[in-house]
Amino acid sequence: PADLEVSRPPCERYDATSAAYTPDTVPAQARTQLTSALELGGPRCATRAVQQLTGLAITRYVGIDLDRLGAAVDVLSGVEVCTPRAVVDATLGPVAPTAGTVTLDARRATDFVQATSVADDPAAGRGRIERQQQVLAAVLGDTLSDTGLLDLPRLASLRPALGGALSTDDADLGQVLAL
């Protein structure tokens, strides 16, 4: 979760606009949110913070800007998700007004992954994380299905949409999809 408390290591400052590191250093900070590592120090810092926390060796970074995933949903003409409860956000309103299977267009998919004030959501942002995983799984499932991989015009349209939503540590979209 983005608000997970971590001890952020010292990192090179990251400029998200240019997707480049600057010569400045972001000092270490104890008891800060994981999201600060990504916002201030980019993928390298976020990776180091997670490695420090878990002890796992991380060899690749793939980030997905879920706000930009709507373009891929649009190319797919919507995605289907199954939600165990209605998703009615206090700010966004009804996103999936009833429980069950719902088809989301690009706008509703974006609202679905952004909804943060949903009644009866599990604690600690788990409901939002689950919704984000559902949309991502639906996009990738449609893309990587047997019929999806054979639809070359659709794959050609999906490539820039998915590429615009991804940030990696020097891996291209082909390498990411191979993962």
Image (spheres, rainbow, N blue to C red):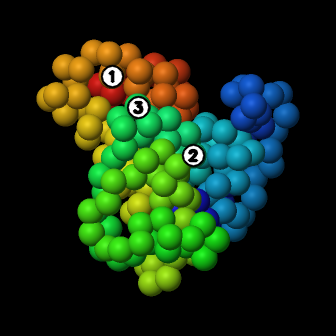
Q: CA distance from mark 2 to mark 1?
A: 21 Å
- The reply to whether discs 1 and 3 touch (Cβ–Cβ < 8 Å) is yes
At label 1, which amino acid type do we have? Arg
Nearest-to-viewer mark from 2 and 1:
1
| Nearer the observer, 52 or 131 | 131
Q: Is residue 43 above or below residue 107?
A: above
Mark 3 Cα within 10 Å, few/some/many (few <14, many 20+)?
some
Q: Is residue 32 left or right of residue 107?
A: right
Q: CA distance from mark 3 to mark 2?
A: 15 Å
Mark 2 Cα within 10 Å, few/some/many (few <14, many 20+)?
some
Mark nearer the N terminus (1 vs 3): 3
Residue 40 seen in the figure:
yes
* Residue at numbered disc 3: 75
Please name the residue shown 75% across and 31% down the image.
17
Please name the residue shown 75% across and 52% down the image.
28
Q: Is residue 132 above or below residue 159?
A: below
Give SS at disc 1.
helix
Q: CA distance from mark 1 to mark 3?
A: 7 Å
Marker disc for residue 7: none
* Residue at numbered disc 2: 67
> Percent x, y for residue 39?
71, 46
Q: Is residue 80 left or right of residue 107?
A: left
Asked where in the image residue 15 lies, by quadrant, the reply is: top right
* Residue at numbered disc 1: 154
Please name the residue shown 33% across and 21% down the image.
155
Please name the residue shown 69% across and 68% down the image.
31
| Nearer the observer, 5 or 158 | 158
Q: Residue furthest left?
A: 146
